[in-house]
């Protein structure tokens, strides 16, 4: 991937670059440049070209930088993480960490510029265009969980929302159980996967996807209202700074979750709750339930009233939609 990464860094400014100039910079022939461009295109990188016009990206891209992420970590985070790696492309950052989880005994993070098989909740595909979003997974070992894992995805969402606000000033909301939203449009999502027993010791992989600057064609690939950071006034968001902020919040919040469970975060989560007091439709299998949301309980379950009074719902295979 060495020359592919080098070529990407040359093209990242969004300007036109001739094959000859690129070849001279890389120490290869123009034919070799053409082959490298073809490989990047196969990986989903939209490199544009025309007769005699050279090569360019449709817009400038601030590439992820492992050194910048490391510099943005607090001392505690630097001490906790075994590694923070940046890849050009993977199938899924979650799947990559799940595959090595048995050999890893300290927190570890993996980021990628693009994913070929990104996954969301309930097996949905996560749209993963090159350089347009933050694709980050965190592998976190828990030695003991007296309160279990209930509510972990909510705590992860809170960490992401806090990091977004600290980095960009955008006050995002939380939509139970695992979405970060802005004015009811999806900004980011969380996918938590478990290895071991929920009471510990166990390891979890927390997958985080944040819409940063999606291409104009994104609407055709996303089946719900969405928004990205760029459209909210954060032009070309610094994804490396955002990643460091998320990892810092994880190091502050996940140990507290291990000790105290979700109850310690319930009030803070409620301050960002985008559903409380609103009418929703809850889909559980083939059943549809309607009611008003009354927040969440100490275990992170959704509290919703219906004809039987206030009922709690755990996430599982449940989806929630605002009533129209």
Image (cartoon, rainbow, N blue to C red):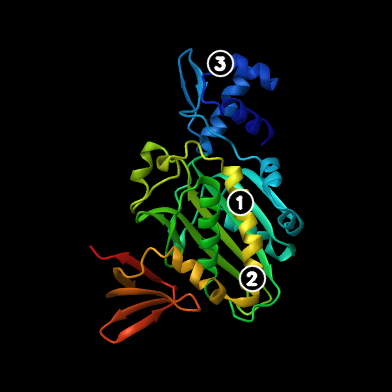
Badge 3 marks a residue whose secondary structure is loop
Which residue occupies 65% across, 76% down?
259
Q: Position of residue 38 (x, y in %)?
A: 54, 29
Instruction: Identify whether 320 is placed above or below 34.
Output: below
- Front tag of 1 and 3: 1
- The disc label shown at residue 256, or none: 2
Report which residue position mark 1 lands on: 245
Front-lying residue, 272 or 157:
272
Q: Position of residue 287 (x, y in %)?
A: 29, 76
Report which residue position mark 3 lands on: 18
Instruction: Identify whether 139 is placed above or below 283.
Output: above
Q: CA distance from mark 3 to mark 2?
A: 53 Å
Q: Of callouts 3 and 2, which one flags the residue occurring earlier in the amino acid sequence? A: 3
Which residue occupies 34% across, 53% down?
223
Front-lying residue, 253 or 119:
253
User: Farthest residue in the right direction?
Assistant: 79
Instruction: Identify whether 135 is placed above or below 194.
Output: above
Which residue occupies 59% across, 30% down?
8
Q: Position of residue 51 (x, y in %)?
A: 45, 14
Position of residue 323 in the picture relative to residue 132 (left or right): left
User: Farthest residue in the top direction?
Assistant: 52
Badge 1 marks a residue whose secondary structure is helix
User: Few, some or many C-alpha atoms within 10 Å of disc 2 (few <14, some 14-19, many ≥20)?
Assistant: some
């Amino acid at each position: 991937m060495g020359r592919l990464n080098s070529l990407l860094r040359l093209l990242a400014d969004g300007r036109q670059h001739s094959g000859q100039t690129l070849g001279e910079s890389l120490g290869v022939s123009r034919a070799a440049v053409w082959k490298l461009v073809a490989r990047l295109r196969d990986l989903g990188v939209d490199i544009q070209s025309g007769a005699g016009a050279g090569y360019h990206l449709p817009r400038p891209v601030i590439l992820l930088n492992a050194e910048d992420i490391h510099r943005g970590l607090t001392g505690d985070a630097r001490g906790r993480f075994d590694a923070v790696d940046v890849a050009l492309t993977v199938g899924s950052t979650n799947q990559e960490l799940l595959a090595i989880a048995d050999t890893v005994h300290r927190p570890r993070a993996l980021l990628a510029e693009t994913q070929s098989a990104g996954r969301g909740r309930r097996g949905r595909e996560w749209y993963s265009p090159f350089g347009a979003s933050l694709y980050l997974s965190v592998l976190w070992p828990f030695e003991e969980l007296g309160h279990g894992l209930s509510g972990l995805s909510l705590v992860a969402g809170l960490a992401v929302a806090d990091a977004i606000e600290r980095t960009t000033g955008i006050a995002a909301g939380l939509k139970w159980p695992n979405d970060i939203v802005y004015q009811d449009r999806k900004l980011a999502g969380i996918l938590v996967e478990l290895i071991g027993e929920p009471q510990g010791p166990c390891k979890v992989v927390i997958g985080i996807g944040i819409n940063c600057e999606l291409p104009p064609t994104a609407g055709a690939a996303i089946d719900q209202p969405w928004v990205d950071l760029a459209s909210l006034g954060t032009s070309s968001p610094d994804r490396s700074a955002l990643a460091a902020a998320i990892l810092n919040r994880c190091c502050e919040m996940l140990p507290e979750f291990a000790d105290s469970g979700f109850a310690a975060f319930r009030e803070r989560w409620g301050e960002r709750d985008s559903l409380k007091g609103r009418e929703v439709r809850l889909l559980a299998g083939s059943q549809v339930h309607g009611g008003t949301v009354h927040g969440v309980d100490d275990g992170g379950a959704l509290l919703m009233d219906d004809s039987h009074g206030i009922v709690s719902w755990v996430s599982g295979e449940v989806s929630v939609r605002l009533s129209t």
